[in-house]
Image: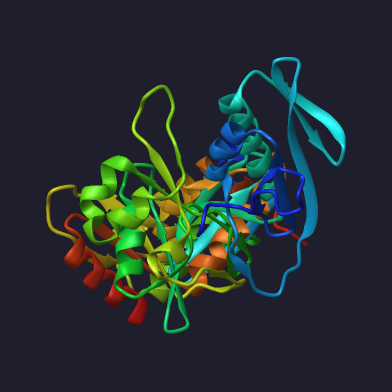
């Protein structure tokens, strides 16, 4: 079952959650069931083509009424409870995954494939990118990631991470709601739950592979309205992508080069995202163009 | 002073520019300013003419000729040149490049 890791597989009574980056396989181990339950939110085990990962064992041990986190046997952090352990390891995992591709631009985008063609959906937080991505999965697309892609010249590779779905999005994902609501979740101070959904729990494969992009769809919300799509000029796409790219301290020029190379090769579209049935038809047109 | 203002000013692309061609123009990263400029095809052609060998008047004339434009467009071409200067992509120099 995706999201649930081995329990005491070595007979040690420990729980384990696995999270992959492009170069590392983090094994989060703890004897504490509450910590384990929280850390399931980090579960991430896609198939990654052509890359191998080195093992990194991180253990979270009860210590003096709190928890001490060890990496490679060395203490790296003391935390007061399971929630703080998750917060720390979430950031730790994110930072490690970003370090995997130091020369690449990190673009805020979902990455999907259909019939061997790759599509990026990009747009600001709250645009509906992840919900549309899962609707596309339900319509037969394969998803590689729903949050970040590394842009390296004219090719990309998704940053490994399971799909994150807000509880408020479930009414838009009715056919998948049961499976999603069984996934591990994060909830802070009684706020809505955010589910960590392995695409395989939705019956889709989850394979990440570096390769070119055929179409980029820039999303603009039109919540409650119709969806419509129109071609976008490559230079306008670069301008849009700039606003959705996380800049690194060095090599901004390289990032601009990466985005220009992407825009020079892929077809670009502007999707006004309203209701999903027509949005899916619009995306079908984009990826087939 | 009078002489200086009447001398032709040769247009030269600034140093430290990283120029990327896309199907509808150029994306130019200016490392010293940490700034990105988007040039459409016409602006990209004007930018290309700024090779240090042509004064502004000649560039305006050549671009106008390429696109078969009348004199009425001269002002727009000149405005584009000025905007390239303002963006720091082009500099005016009193001497042509060797």
User: Which quadrant of the figure has residue A248?
Assistant: top right
| Residue A84 x/y as whole percent | 60, 25
Q: Position of residue A19 (x, y in %)?
A: 64, 52
Q: Is residue B12 above or below residue A208?
A: above
Residue A59 in the image, given as x and y percentages of width and height: 75, 38
At 57% from the left edge and 50% from the top edge, which residue is drawn? Answer: A43
Q: In the displayed image of the protein, which residue is found farthest to the front?
A: A11
Name, please, the residue furthest toward the bottom: A115
Q: Is residue A282 left or right of residue A113?
A: left
Using the image, determine if residue A205 lies above or below residue A56. below
Report the residue at 62% width, 40% height from top. B34
Look at the picture and state if A79 lies above or below A46: above
**Is residue A14 rendered to the left or right of residue A143?**
right
For the rendered model, the colour scheme is: rainbow
Q: Position of residue A273 (x, y in %)?
A: 23, 55
Left or right of residue B63: residue A61: right
**Residue at the spot 59% in from the left edge and 27% down from the top edge:** A82
Quarter of the picture holding the C terminus of chain B:
bottom right
Count of residue discs:
0
Residue B52 in sight in this render: yes
Nearest the viewer among A262 and B59 is A262
Residue B32 position (above or below residue A51): above
User: Is any atom of residue A248 visible in this view?
Assistant: no
Given the current orientation, which residue lies at the most extreme top position?
Answer: A64
Residue in front for this viewpoint, A15 or B8: A15
Q: Quadrant of the N terminus of chain B?
A: top right
Give the residue furthest to the left.
A225
Q: Residue at x 30, y 61 (%)?
A: A270
């Amino acid at each position: 079952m995706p999201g649930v890791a081995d329990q005491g597989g070595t007979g040690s009574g420990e729980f384990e959650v696995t999270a992959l980056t492009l170069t590392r396989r983090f094994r989060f181990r703890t004897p504490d069931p509450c910590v384990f339950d929280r850390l399931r939110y980090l579960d991430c085990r896609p198939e990654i083509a052509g890359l191998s990962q080195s093992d990194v064992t991180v253990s979270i041990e009860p210590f003096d009424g709190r928890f001490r986190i060890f990496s490679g046997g060395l203490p790296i952090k003391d935390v007061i409870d399971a929630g703080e352990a998750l917060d720390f390891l979430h950031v730790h995992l994110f930072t490690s995954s970003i370090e995997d591709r130091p020369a690449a631009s990190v673009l805020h985008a979902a990455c999907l494939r259909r019939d061997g063609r790759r599509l990026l959906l990009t747009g600001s937080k709250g645009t509906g990118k992840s919900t549309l991505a899962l609707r596309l999965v339900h319509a037969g697309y394969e998803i590689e990631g729903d949050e970040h892609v590394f842009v390296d010249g004219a090719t990309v590779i998704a940053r490994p991470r399971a799909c994150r779905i807000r509880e408020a999005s479930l009414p838009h994902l009715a056919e998948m709601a049961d499976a999603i609501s069984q996934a591990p979740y994060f909830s802070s101070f009684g706020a809505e739950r955010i589910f960590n959904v392995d695409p395989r729990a939705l019956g889709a494969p989850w394979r990440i592979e570096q390769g070119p992009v055929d179409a980029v769809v820039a999303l603009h919300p039109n919540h409650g309205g119709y969806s419509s799509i129109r071609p976008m000029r490559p230079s306008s796409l670069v301008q849009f992508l700039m606003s959705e790219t996380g800049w690194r301290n060095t090599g901004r020029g390289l990032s601009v080069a990466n985005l220009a190379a992407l825009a020079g090769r892929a077809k670009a579209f502007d999707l006004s995202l309203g209701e999903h049935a027509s949005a899916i038809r619009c995306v079908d047109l984009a990826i087939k163009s | 002073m009078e002489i200086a203002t009447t001398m032709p000013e040769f247009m030269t692309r600034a140093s430290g520019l990283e120029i990327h061609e896309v199907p509808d123009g150029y994306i130019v990263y200016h490392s010293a300013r940490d700034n990105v400029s988007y040039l459409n095809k016409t602006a990209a052609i004007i930018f290309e003419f700024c090779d240090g060998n042509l004064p502004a008047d000649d560039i305006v004339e050549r671009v106008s000729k390429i696109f078969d434009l009348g004199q009425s467009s001269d002002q727009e071409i000149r405005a584009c040149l000025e905007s390239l200067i303002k963006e720091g992509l082009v500099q005016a120099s009193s001497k042509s490049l060797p």
